[in-house]
Image (tube, rainbow, N blue to C red):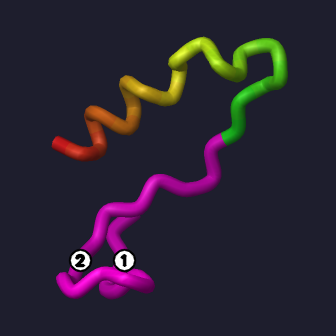
Amino acid sequence: SIRKTAEGCKINNIGCIEGWYIEMDFINRGLGRRPVKIAEN
């Protein structure tokens, strides 16, 4: 989602990844890296 403001940010329209869940069996396997990289670009 795009938020108009975020705590600690001096710019507007901040992209925000929210509401995702990783099952315990899949934690620490790097599965979150790709979605974050895509969101950053």
- Crowding around mark 2 (Cα neighbors within 10 Å: few <14, some 14 to 19, many 20+) is few
Q: Amino acid at mark 2?
A: Asn
> Could you tell me the amino acid type at mark 1?
Arg
The image quadrant where one finds the N terminus is bottom left
* CA gap, disc 2 and disc 1: 5 Å
| Residue under numbered circle 2 | 13
Q: Number of marks in the image? A: 2
Residue 29 image point, x, y percent: 60, 13
Q: Is residue 16 magenta?
A: yes
The residue at 63%/44% (across/down) is 20
Q: Residue at x 30, y 81 (%)?
A: 9
How many other residues sit within 10 Å of disc 1, few (<14), some (14-19) or many (≥20)? few
Which quarter of the picture shows residue 18?
A: bottom right
The label on residue 20 is none
Which quadrant, please, contains the C terminus? top left
Point out residue 7 in the picture as x, y percentages from the top left corner: 43, 85
- Label 1 SS: strand
Question: Label 1 belongs to which residue?
Answer: 3
Residue sitting at 52 percent across and 18 percent down? 30
The stretch in magenta equals 1-20
Most frequent secondary structure within the magenta stretch? loop
Q: Position of residue 27 (x, y in %)?
A: 71, 22
Q: Is residue 22 left or right of residue 17?
A: right
Above or below, comparing residue 31 to residue 10 in the picture: above
N-term-proximal mark, 2 vs 1: 1
**29 left or right, relative to 22:** left
Taking the image as shown, residue 32 lies to the left or right of residue 35, namely: right
Q: Tag 2, which secondary structure? A: loop
State the image quarter where residue 16 is shown: bottom left
Q: Is residue 20 above or below residue 16?
A: above
Q: Are marks 2 and 1 in contact (CB under 8 Å)?
A: yes
Q: Is residue 30 above or below residue 16?
A: above
